[in-house]
Image: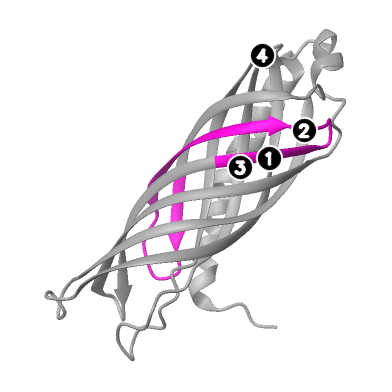
Amino acid sequence: MTIPSSLHGLFGFFGRFGSFGFLGLSALSLAAPAAYAQAFSDPGVAFGLQGGISKGREADAVPVGRLHVRYRVTGMVGVELAAAYRNEEVRVQDAPFVRLAQGQLTGSFLLFLLFDHPVQPFLLGGGGYYYVTERGLGANPDFQRTEHLFGFHAGGGVDVRVGRRVSVFLDARYTFLGLANIDPGYAGKADFVSATAGVNLYF
């Protein structure tokens, strides 16, 4: 199966981000004392923030920030409620076409692997509400619209417990999001991938 050319850039930037991030978290994991192991899988609530980069199908990479609350239901299972914002300029045939500003409120289920170790890879999936404002650019300057959308996401990451109440993590996710048709030359796909690093504080 041939991978669309619009996705090659997504995989490329994620690969570079993930390589450096993995090396950093690996170094931190070596410093995490084994004495904390008994608390790694304890149920509890964590408040966190994360920041990184995000790239849409027809847009350049942009900054993204996210605030979240995570609840560890069991050692293996967690849930997350998160709020995020991103703003991107979509280009069609290398010309500015529309600017999308997204406010996001999402929920996720997390499945932690190796949950009795300081380094815990995890998988995640979920969905959420997206408040999207669209403003025309270039040849379409008068276009303006607001949409209320529901999108799905899936991804994974790795969480490293560096203290009894502190962990750092990498998180990558792909979001499936469709817009109402704007123009025959634009497919209306607003899918994007994001890669972030963050910190959790447990209570």
For disc 2, the marked residue is 73
Q: Nearer the viewer, mark 2 or mark 3?
A: 2
> Are the residues flagged by discs 2 and 1 in contact, CB closer than 8 Å?
yes
Name the disc covering residue 165, or none: 4
* Identity, as a three-letter code, of the amino acid under mark 3: Asp
Name the disc covering residue 171, or none: 3
For disc 1, the marked residue is 79
* Identity, as a three-letter code, of the amino acid under mark 2: Val
Helix, strand or loop at mark 4: loop
> Are the residues flagged by discs 2 and 3 in contact, CB closer than 8 Å?
no
> Which residue range is magenta in the image?
53-81
- In which quarter of the view is residue 43 placed? top right
Q: Residue furthest bottom?
A: 184
* Identity, as a three-letter code, of the amino acid under mark 1: Val
Q: Earlier in the sequence, mark 1 or mark 4?
A: 1
Label 2 Cα crowd, 10 Å radius (few <14 / some 14-19 / many 20+): some
Q: At 70% from the left edge and 26% from the top edge, which residue is drawn?
A: 160
Pick whichever, 19 or 161, lies toward us.
161
